[in-house]
Image (cartoon, rainbow, N blue to C red):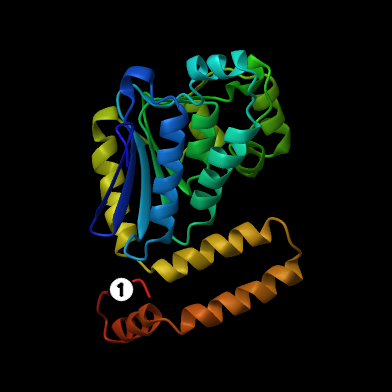
Amino acid sequence: MSDSVAYDVTEGVGTITLNRPEAMNSLDSATKAALRDAAREAAGDDSVRVIVVRGTGRAFCVGQDLKEHAASLAAGQGLADTVREHYNPLLRALVTAPKPVLAAVNGVAAGAGAALAFAADLRIASDKAAFNLAFANIGLTADSGASWTLPRLVGPAKALELLMLPETIGIEQAAELGLVHRVVPAEELDATVGELAARMAAGPTAAYAAIKQAVGFGLAHTLDETLDLEAELQDACAATEDHRNAVRAFLAKEKPAFVGR
């Protein structure tokens, strides 16, 4: 995609790699645009059955490149344009992607970088990872979807605390809060994420998409509305090739082979 963002598709896994290790994968304009475009491409590509977002070097992503931002402020520019043009479409693409999204959190994830990790469906973290919702420390409110994702992960009261009184959240506390799903030694992160991505890429993609849709819908709708949607989604899943093959395999006492449709 660019020098700062790499995108690769291998065996159904679309991997988006932030590659500005010298800047701790901070997000300058070029990186934000490339990251947004990669997320959109991966979300819309039927050959991609799972998306992995990862960083290189010591950090996952420390958020907005403040050096570039300082220059923008000096030129009389704010953040509204980049929030609308970069962050919002990036987060929409990942959260609404009809396939699982995994974040491989190798190091610190701060500000928009933390929000990027929270937009994933599953977060696998290195034992060297940490989080910081640093927005208020520089006089800003949350962006990049953090005000939407964080309360869903930790509850509204804890989300307000983490956003209003930002401090570094070590990996043990992050695991206790439910910010990450699994913690592994740093040297095992890539292999662990690779194994999980391969497993999910070989799984029932349509069912995963329906699960994401149902859970997201249920958080903002009534029980009756959610039950109605579940019925619609289950009917659609029942018509898939994956479901028919899985039922045949079950009756034959065989392992099902999912094709993603």
Q: Is residue 216 above or below residue 76?
A: below
Would you say residue 100 is visible in this rendering? no
Which quadrant, please, contains the C terminus?
Answer: bottom left
Under mark 1, the amino acid is Val
Which of the pair 199/18 is nearer the observer?
A: 18
Q: Mark 1 points at which residue?
A: 259
Task: Indicate left or right for 28 with 213 as reference.
Answer: left
Task: Indicate left or right for 197 with 232 as reference.
Answer: left
Q: Where is residue 51 in the image (x, y as percent from the top left)?
A: 37, 51
Task: Indicate left or right for 113 with 195 as reference.
Answer: right
The structure residue drawn at horizontal position 65% and vertical position 73%, both measured from the top left corner, is 229
Could you tell me which secondary element the residue under label 1 belongs to? loop
Would you say residue 228 is visible in this rendering? yes
Q: Quadrant of residue 144?
A: top right
The structure residue drawn at horizontal position 53% and vertical position 56%, both measured from the top left corner, is 96
Q: Position of residue 92 (x, y in %)?
A: 56, 50
Which quadrant, please, contains the N terminus?
Answer: top left
